[in-house]
Image (cartoon, grey):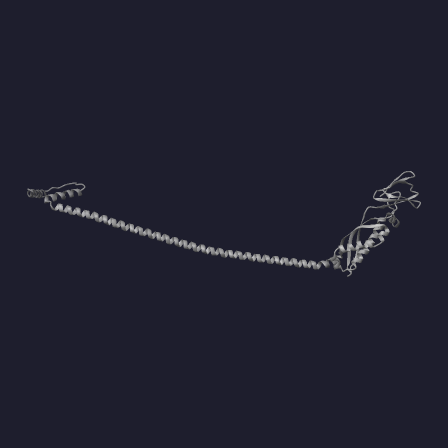
Amino acid sequence: MAQITRFPFLKRYRSEASAQTRLFRGGHLVRDGRGLAFWFDPSRVSIAEIPLSDRELTFLVKSQSADYQDIAVQGTVLWSVADVARLSERVDFSIDLRTGRHIGKPEDHVARILNGLVGEFADSYVKELGVRPLLEAGLAPLQARITEGFAEDPTLDQMGLTVTAIRVAALTPDSELARALKAPTFESLQQKADEASFARRALAVDKERAIAENELANQIELASRRSDLIARDDANARAEAEALAEAQKIAAEGAARAKVIAAEAEATRIRAVEQAEADMERARLAAIGTLDAAQLYALAARDFAQKLEKIDALTVTPDMLSGLVRQIGQAAGARG
């Protein structure tokens, strides 16, 4: 936007470098250039300011496809001024000499022209195809058609404009049509999701069955091992009992043999002792057989005295003495 400074009887004008100023006095162009600054008499001149920087126009075109379905095209057009003189002749860029603003809305006028051209080019493309081929083709063909349309149409050249870039952002059907178009894909995806879910469940069932079979096999294996262990324990216990019984038998046989040997030894000892006693008794009897009556009585008295532990009283009668004296006498006579 231009800056206008007011002074008595005169005003000073200064524009930005991104705009071109055209000063007219008496219907004749007296100044034309970018970033100008000058004094002027507001009662005698008119000024036009044309922006030279790129402008961006957002467009929305509504059309119908070949199968009569509503389609909306959204995008942007980047445009700029190619010929200032030609544009200023076609569009009024005059500014208010008090405020420095444009008197009208020249950029809106240019935007309407560009919107009309974009709508024409987009509509011609959309009407050629059905809605599904349009959506399947994507945005690139439509953007190429709009670009070709601007290149072939003489309007931009006549107005002194140029289109720098065209971008188509969206090609969208009506909301109900969009839902209808999405339905098959959604159903297909839902079917695939269901199939994936069923496959996942089937896989889970297979895994659970495999786990159950594995657990059952483990239980069978454990039961088999437990049975083998019980059989081995039984065999070990039986072997241990047999070994213990055999050991006890051997011990009993050994003890019996020891007792037999001990008994035989004892019997041998007893026989030897009894034999010795018998021999001694036989020798003693033989010795006694050689003694006389007095000696025998003396031996008997000695043996009798050995048997007696205590003699409380002893009675001696004459008969006993007479008999004893007689026996002694007989014994002495026999010895003499």
Name the outermost residue toward the top.
Answer: 8
In this view, the residue in front, 172 or 134, is: 134
The correct choice, above or below, for 37 with respect to 190 in the image is: above
Image quadrant occupied by the C terminus: top left
Residue at 41% from the left image edge and 55% from the top image edge = 235
Residue 246 location (% of width, % of height): 35, 53
Question: Which image quadrant: the N terminus?
Answer: top right
Task: Please indicate whether residue 192 sits to the left or right of residue 313 in the image.
Answer: right
Q: Residue at x 23, y 49 (%)?
A: 268
Residue in the foreground of this view, choosing between 213 and 129: 129
Where's residue 331, x and y in %? 8, 43
Q: Position of residue 299 (x, y in %)?
A: 13, 43
Judged left or right of residue 41, residue 269 is: left
Number of residue marks: 0
Quick check: 136 above or below 42? below
- Residue 300 appears in which quarter of the rendering? top left
Q: Residue 292, position in %: x, y?
A: 10, 45
Q: Nearer the viewer, residue 82 or 26?
A: 82
Extreme residue toward the bottom, this view: 67
